[in-house]
Each structure stands twice: as C-alpha cells, then as structure tokens.
Image (spheres, coloured by chain):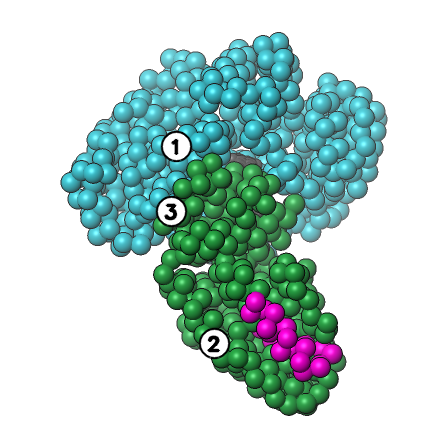
Amino acid sequence: MQVNENSYMYEMIRTELTDILGDQFVGVKEADLFGHSVDFYWIPEMWHDRGMETPKPDFICHPSTTEEVSKIMKIANQYKIPVVPWGGGSGSQGGALPVYGGIIMDMKRMNKYYGIDKESLTVRCQTGIIAKHLEWNCNKEGYSTMHLPASISCATIGGFLAHRGTGVLSTKYGKIEDMVMSLEVVTPTGEIIRTLPVPRHASGPDLTMLFMGSEGTLGIITEVTLKVHPQPEAREFRAYIFKDFHTAMSAGAELMRSRLQPCAIRLYDETETKTHVRKVFGMELEQGAYLVFGFDGRRDIVDCQMRYAREIMEEKYHGQDLGSKGGDLWWENKYKFFYPPYMFHIPQAFGTLDTVATFANIENVYYAMKKVVNENFPQARFIGHFSHWYEWGCMLYARFIFEEDAVPKDPREAAALYNRVWDMAIRAAIANGGVINEHHGVGLKLGRYMKDLYGTAMPVLEGIKKQLDPNNIMNPGKMGFKGI
Amino acid sequence: MNIDKYTETIKACRFCFMCRHLSAIGNVTFTEADTPRVRASMLYGVTMFPERLTSDDLVKTMYRSDLSACCRRNCVNHYEENALNLAYRADLVEAGAVPENIKAIAAELKGMPAWSVSGKGEVVYVADNYSVQSGAAAAFAKLAGGVQTVKGGSCGKGLWVLGFREEARKMAQTFVDVLESTGAATVVVSHTGIYDLLVNTLLEMGLSLKAKVMHSSEYLAKIKTAKKLGKVYYLESDFLRNYNDDYPFPKAVLETNGAMLQPFGTNDEESYSCGEGALLLDKIEPELVEKLAKYIEARADNPSNDVIVVASPYTKVQLKKYTSLNVKTIEELLAEAL
Ligand SMILES: Cc1cc2nc3c(=O)[nH]c(=O)nc-3n(C[C@H](O)[C@H](O)[C@H](O)COP(=O)(O)OP(=O)(O)OC[C@H]3O[C@@H](n4cnc5c(N)ncnc54)[C@H](O)[C@@H]3O)c2cc1C
Ligand code: SF4
C-alpha cells in the first residue's frame, strides 16, 4: 500500500507508530522528510540541484530498541507499507532512498555501545552507531575496530554491514564481513533472530553472511559483535613511483603474493597520480604511477616486513623510492580527498565504478572499463586507483567525471547520460571477470545488472527474498529485487 | 539575501557528509535535518525558491542548530557553516518572519537594564548574568582584586545570533561606549560568547574597541595557587576552541597550577558545551539543552566524583541545572585552591 497523507489510514498508522515510539520519534516534518530524500547517490543530488522534487517517505521512525523495530515491522506488514532502513544516508547507490514512500527506519538512535570483551577481543553494539563513535569508544580502551573507511564519520555500522563496506586497512584486517562475529536481525515479518555466536563452524550454512550485503532487503540488522584489535605499536608507510601503471600493478601484486602482510596498499593510475595525488598531497609528480603501502604491528615485525617489501619494490620493479614521508603524507591525508573542494561535486557528473577481480583479470577489467568510457564518452575523464588488496586480486576504484558544460541541463537527459555510462562500464567489467561492485553495494543504481551478474543463481536470491519477505515490504525495488 | 554571500558554503556543505559525527544537536535528536548537509541543502532550495525562506520547519531547524563550529574546525577547507546559519536568521529578520518565541527572547534582551559600572582600576571585568550565576564572577573578584566591574546589561551578541543585526550593532555600540567610558586599558570577560563578540563580531559589525580584550583565563595566566589542582577534566569551549583557533589560556592556567588534565569522553573533537555556540539555546530549546547535558553526563568516567572544569559560564549553568556532575568554572577552581 502506498500511504496518502490526506487519507484516514495515514493518521491511523501514524498513531500506531507514535504509540510505540512517542511523538518526537516519528518524524513527519518537512525538513526531516527532505533530509531522507537525498542520499549520496548522484541522481537525487542532481534532481535537488535542478529544483526537482525528490520522493519523500511518509514517516521516519527512530527506534531505540530491537523490540521497537520488531513492532514497527509488524505494523508495516499488516498494512503492507514499505520500510527502508536508513543509517547515515552516505550510501552512493540510492539504497536508502524511499522510492515508494512508506517508513524510513532511521537507525541512528540505536547507538548503544556495550563494551569490549577483552578476553575474546570483540565488541558489541547496536548498529545505528556512527562508525567513528564506535571507533572512539574502542580507542578509549586501547583498541580499534580497524574499520577505517573514508565515511567513518558519517556512516553507521549497520550501513557498512548492509553494504559489505571496506576501510583503508582492509588488506590486513579485512572487509567488514571479515570482522563480524555475529548479528541480531529483525526479519521483514518482525521476528527477532540471532546468527551463531562465532563465524567459523561446521554447523550448517552461514546465516550471518546471508545478511551481510543484503542492503536492508532481507531484514534490519539491529546488533552486531565485531572483532577488535589492540592498537599497534608501530604503523609505517612507504611510497614509490613506478614508470607506468602496469609495473606498479605488478609490484603490488607481487607484494601480496609474497604473503607479507601489508595493512594497506594503494595504487593510483597515471592520470590520478598526476591530478589527485599532486592536488591533495602537494607532491610534484609529472609521470608514472604512485603506489603506497604500509605495515603495522610490533615494531620489529614492521621493520622486517618493510625490508622485504622494499626489496620487491626496488630490486625487482625498480620503483623510485619516495621514502616514508611520501607514504606518511598519504596516510595523513587519506580522508582529505572526500572533503569539499577536493571531492567531485555537482555541477560535475561523477560516479565511482568500483569493482574487484583477480590479479589475472584486474588489468583487463581496468583497460576495458577505461576504453568504453573514453570511446563512448570522450567528454568524460576516467581515473582510477586500486584501494583494497587481497591475496588473490584487488579492487579497482575507477571514476568517471563530466565537467559542468558536458552535463545536459535537462535533469532527465542528465540521468539518462549517467545511466548509459554505468551500463557500458559495468557490462565491460562483468565481461572481463569483474563484479558489479566491491564495497559501495548495489542499491537502486546497479540493481538492473544483478541478473547479468548472478545468471541462473538469481532465482536463488529471489527465493530467499520471497521466503523472508512475503509481502515485499523491505526496501522494495533495490538490489535487483522487484518493486511494488 | 544575506545567505547569498555564502553560496560557496551552501554548495560545499549541501552534499557533504564529512562532519555529521560532530553535529551536537544531530547526536541527540538523531535527525538528518540537524546536520550541516541538510541545512545547507534546504538553504540551496531557498536560493531557488525564495518563498521557502519562511517555511516553519526550516525556521525551527535553523534556530535549533548548536552553532558549535566543530564542523568548521574539522572541515579541511573550514567552510562557514555557522556564518551561513546566522545569515539565514538575518534574512528572516529582514523578511519580518521571525517566530514569536524568538521575538520574545529578543524583546527580553532589548529590555535588559543598562550596564552599571563600579570599582576602580586599569582593568574592567564584565560581570554578565551567566558569569554571576555560574559563580565565575565572584571567584574572579577573589582572584583578581581591584578591578572595575560592569554589570547587568546586554552586549548585542545575543541579538546578533538571533538575526537582529541592526539592533545588535546599536546595542554592541552602547556596550563598547560603556567599556570605553571606564578608561580601562584591558577588558576581561569570563563569558566566552562576549569574548567572541569583542574580538570577532565587533569587526563584522564595523565597530571597534580600543582596549585589549582577554578571557579571564588569559588574565589569570600568572596566578599561582597554593594547592595543586590535581586530576580534572576540562571541557572545551566552542567559542574559545572552535571560533578562536584553539585559544590556549584555559588549559595553560590549569596546567601551570598543577592540574592533571584528563581526556573527557571519547574524543577532543565534539562539542561538550550544551550549545554554548548558539548562545541562547537554553532559551530557544531548553529540552534540547537538557539532552545535550545528559549526553555529556553519560560520557563522564565517574559522574559523581570527577572534577569537571569549564571555561564557559553558560556551560556550567546548564550542566548544574540538568546533571549531577561536579562542575566548576576555571575561576572557581583556581579560587578554591588559592
Ligand atoms: C565521503 C564518502 C566516503 C565514502 N567512503 C567509503 C569507504 O571508504 N568505504 C565504504 O565501504 N564506503 C564508503 N562510502 C559509502 C558509504 O559510506 C557506505 O556505503 C556505507 O556503508 C553507508 O552506510 P550508511 O550508514 O550511511 O547507510 P545508508 O546510506 O543509510 O544505507 C545504505 C544501505 O544500507 C541499508 N541499511 C542501513 N542500515 C541498515 C541496517 N541497520 N540494517 C539493514 N540495512 C541497513 C539501507 O537500507 C541502504 O540500503 C563513502 C561515502 C561517502 C559519502
Ligand atoms: S563544514 Fe565542511 S565538512 Fe562540514 S558539511 Fe560543510 S563542507 Fe562538509
């Protein structure tokens, strides 16, 4: 059902919601409804920029307990109204947008920190906590989640779980799905369930992983237990310039194959080295590709790993050493890219075409995406860096950017152009062994490629959705699932 | 419109999420509206559709901002999120669309008695109502001895923050005249908002004051207490830390007198001030100030035992009112240890 503000049902439902949460925690005011109609997805931002109305929710619920979430879900099922979980709204895929109106379940009031189990090195919290607030709490006790994404200050832990988010130290500490021990979830029908307390077992399939990356389509994650780590004694970075992107990629891949344990590696392609690295770090780098990596842990082990890594960089791939200062500059400025005026912003049209592939495929994916963007959209720029590295491959964080004069003034034409870039680039990635996304998720933006990506496995996902959400009220129309 | 001077800020903040963790009000209301992002987006809407300027909900949202300037301090390019908010309020006043509760607060400020001057000396101390109520003024008198005192009036900063710029300027001029009439070479204030008025806002108003201006912590920098201050938690002031480049004197005077400063809460980026930057939030949104106070209380290591010291008399007054924290102004702590 879509609720109409002028209907009796609107008032009936509002009364039921306020009965659970109290008046002040059921938002129906203009400013807040507007605030939940634009997330970090370019299309709603562009619509707002052009003076178009952005679709609003009917109610914003701010629960503080799992039980309240459960009760709201039961009401939503009774009236068959859509429910969209909202964390910080920092998702770039439109996943939290209330495309069919209904209830926004804003999770930020569910921000309780339950403390660290110092024997097991785990931390338990509600999922609406802003990631930075969780990190600060852990830091106060001498620990870190080691989940340090650029949006740490605005995204919630629930948002990261729902998107399988990634932080800058992922190469050693993993993506958030590697950090999670167990979850509490409210299913679309309002049942409260807990997944097994440990992530490694042989007690059936892994329910925790079913909800990781489910983007609010299979339920609402209300509580989580995550691993934590002691703050390392030392953390050191070093940067190199390689003669070209291919050499730099080979050096990075070799570092991973050596099974040393860098905490981070980042490689910028030649274009991004010239533009971004220079602009943000103030380094004069005219050509080549910039690669930075680091190690953390005990001082002597960091030194030892760094020594071996330097052999790879210098002796085998002849990188030009920018020293630890060149590396530290990157670490100190790692979030600077994301602040205005460094961040791309409207009136530019831009998108992050992130994907991930094995080392055998990643360069092909990069060149294929670059080719389709350059050939079909000569008015756009294509840049890329490789942010998150695994034993078997790495993540490509590619971007396309149209300057203002290349973006149609008409918002619908602008959206059409934007979507065409995604169509071509994502299909090129899939054709070359990439996937549609590495850590930003699918949301509204990439839902149409899910069938291409999953092929005959897509009905399995659809079957799970149908079983858990018989009334199709949980974030309908997202992640390739059917809308209303 | 006044907000047109801040187009750069509107465009930077409207889609930026980077300082949401520092939105003191957002952290207690949990709403998206109470973030620099949404406020700037809505003001972008006003630049396109001027009739939105006076929308009730926008007005309410803008007047409940904490104006802590934590976001500007955290921001790589220090965009003027607060100045934008103040410009909006001025636009509202110019449009004659200020809500009744704000008008009533303004009327109260305008109706305050004239400043009265007493005492003698080269130094004049501003004993505004918050400084008196918090105990800072009495403690300062004990510490500083023979100074002149101005008491009781309104300085213009409150009207300025509410958006009544013309009236604020006139009132500030009167305040400056009173201060200058004392012939004092140095003006000392405990109230951090009045400090900010005298060192920053007067310039914006096109006014000036000849005397040197000091926060009481700077004036007392050389004081030596008989007893060491011991373990204390210092809560930063929005005005001194965020608006005045990490003004160093509060911590310095505490440390010189043997304070072992403990980190309060989990970080040194948030505002733990009960809305000090908004100057009159206790009058505009008292329930929110209570929530802000409880938020601070919940972050104390040992709420009943910790000695918490503040540079802002406003903050002391609110924490005393809404929590059981053992909170003192810097002046009080020093005076007790004399
Ligand atoms: C400046 C900037 C930098 C970024 N950098 C990174 C980065 O380094 N790494 C990274 O991974 N991402 C990054 N992102 C993207 C974004 O922060 C992530 O996608 C994040 O996971 C979104 O979290 P959120 O709380 O803002 O979620 P929202 O945007 O509110 O929601 C995202 C999705 O999760 C669902 N959801 C939210 N909470 C829950 C819950 N409790 N249960 C179930 N579903 C839920 C929503 O329905 C939606 O589908 C960045 C974004 C910005 C703006
Ligand atoms: S003040 Fe800076 S960090 Fe905050 S929203 Fe504006 S641009 Fe972003």
**Residue bearing mark 1:** A54
Q: How far apart are marks 2 and 1 (CA)?
A: 46 Å
How busy is the neighbourhood of tag 3: few (under 14 within 10 Å), some, or many (20 plus)?
few
**Residue plotted at (51% across, 72% down):** B314
**Residue plotted at (71% across, 48% down):** A234
Q: Indicate the secondary structure of the residue bearing disc 2.
A: loop
Relative height, residue B190 to residue A415 (above, below):
below
Instruction: Please name the color used to draw chain B.
Output: green
Which chain contains the residue that carries disc 2? Answer: B
Cβ(mark 1) to ligand 1 < 8 Å?
no
Q: What residue type is labelled 3?
A: Ser
**Residue plotted at (38% across, 13% down):** A456
Q: Indicate the secondary structure of the residue bearing disc 1.
A: loop
Q: Quadrant of the C terminus of chain B?
A: bottom right
Q: What residue type is labelled 1?
A: Thr
Q: Relative to the observer, which residue lies in front, B174 or A227?
A: B174
Given the current orientation, which residue lies at the most extreme top position?
A: A375
Q: Which amino acid does label 2 sit on?
A: Met
Q: Inspect this view and state whether residue B322 appears.
A: yes
Instruction: Please name the color used to draw chain A.
Output: cyan
Could you say which disc has been placed on residue B55 in the image? 3
The span shown in magenta is B170-193
Q: Inspect this view and state whether residue A227 appears.
A: no
Could you say which disc has been placed on residue B112 in the image? 2
The percent coordinates of residue A158 (x first, y second) are 43, 41
How busy is the neighbourhood of tag 2: few (under 14 within 10 Å), some, or many (20 plus)?
few
